[in-house]
Amino acid sequence: MMPIGSIYVPAFAVGAAAGFLMHRSGFCLVCSFRNFFLFRDVFPARNLLLAVVSSMVLFEAARRLGLLPFYPFPMLGFPSVSHLIGGGIFGVGMVLAGGCVVGVLYRMGAGNLVAGTAFLGLLAGSAVYAEIHPAWSVVKDRGTLSHGWSTIPQGLGVDPGFVVLAVAVPSFALFLRWRADGSWTRRGMLPRGHVPMWAAAIGLSVLGTAVYVLSGMPIGITTSYAKMAGWVESVLAPNHFATLDYFRSVSLNVASPAGEILRGGPAPVFDAVAAIQLPLIAGVVLGSALSAVLLSEFRVYGGAPPKQLLAGFAGGILMGLASRMGSGCNVWHLLGGVPILAAPSLLFAAGLFPGAWAGTLLLRKIIT
Amino acid sequence: MTRMPGRTVELDLRGHVCPASLLLSLKNMNSMREELSSGEVALRILTENRESVPTITDAARSMGYAVTVEHTEAHYVLLVESAGEEVIR
């Protein structure tokens, strides 16, 4: 694990590589859910499964090599009904916005205006959460299902390696079968500079593992959206901002193996959370913008109908709100928590299914 | 059999939310099925959405149409038209 003062450059590089890969491949966590409900298309979901299982194997390898200072990682918490509800609301929002908290960044980096409105919505949603934080904290506490364990292996009292093997072996057998029948290749004509989605899935799992090893936590960015929202609110309405407990809360407070205290939260100050997440965010935007520029595809289009812009903004609000209600976003849970079989993340993922289904019903009405 | 080029209907979906390109392309390919199949109409789709290129071309081919893709300026132009006939241009 790196000292927090040295994390900026590697975090930015990881973000840039992720943004570049996502733009070139079209790897999208939202499509994995939405395309199934909308088109019965399982191609993106197959690639998400590959990313999750690859991350699972890489995280476990890193743990066994002693490279993960925290296992489970900080800010995971205990499983609660709040994770399920957060996942459900997030699922609606990500479909309406046409991208998740990272997808919005890379599409915005490539010049998409709807993604830009969704980004503003994400900040607004984080601010809305600050208003309901005290009440939601009660729901979260009362809905907690276990105070003794966070991950399934902890709950079962077994070595995580056994559970990882039990999931990974049949999964890779399935992946080989899909390889034999050509299911990893998208039918249809491909855009210029295309990177196969399976390669991006594996690449993202490697990048996610690098972030976990270097920072002690998997990829997560939404606490920084709350920081940005808090900063805006502190400038526009300082008196009201001062009354909001949420912006004084601390979500990260651990000591690294080297004795460095990592402390941070949604307060609009530069702390350990910001040191890790802000370079990642900047990297994703600039990496995707670089990819678009290199392909001569960077251009801001204003052609989206107003109702799509509104849907993007509303989707962003729901994602910003739900990522705080569910203690993390889809990237944090799907590519960070699910690979270590964290119960909060599995609940959040379970909530995404009905949410994405409801979102597709709404989106179909908005678009057509 | 040859036919003269018919009229072209343009669908400009640049800047739309994902997956509007695929949804609206499918809707138009379905609603104009007769005209597209007979060669009376060709559908010209403009999109900057990279993910839509394989999905629209795959859907169009599955529906029996011919598709060509051209990258122009910062976007893609997909031309969906009747298949199985020689088109004079």
Image (cartoon, rainbow, N blue to C red):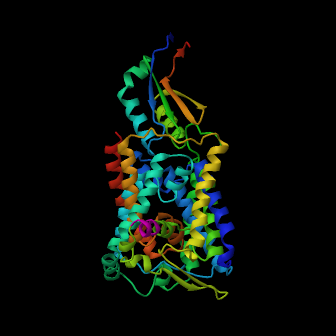
Query: Range of the magenta residues?
Result: A229-236
In the image, residue A335 lies at what x, y percent? 53, 66
In the image, residue A160 lies at what x, y percent? 55, 79
In the foreground, A77 or A12: A12
Asked if one can make out residue A298 in the rendered structure from this viewpoint, the answer is yes
Residue appearing at x 59%, y 36% in the figure: B74
User: Is A233 drawn above or below residue A18 in the view shown?
Assistant: below
Quarter location, residue A147: bottom left
| Horizontal arrangement in the rendering, residue B32 relative to residue B69 (left or right) | left
Name the image quarter holding the C terminus of chain A: top left
In the image, residue A345 lies at what x, y percent? 45, 71
Quarter location, residue A186: top right
Name the image quarter holding the N terminus of chain A: bottom right
Residue appearing at x 43%, y 52% in the figure: A117
Say whether residue B44 is magenta: no
Residue appearing at x 53%, y 68% in the figure: A220
Say whether residue A233 is magenta: yes
In the foreground, A28 or B71: B71
In the foreground, B33 or A30: A30
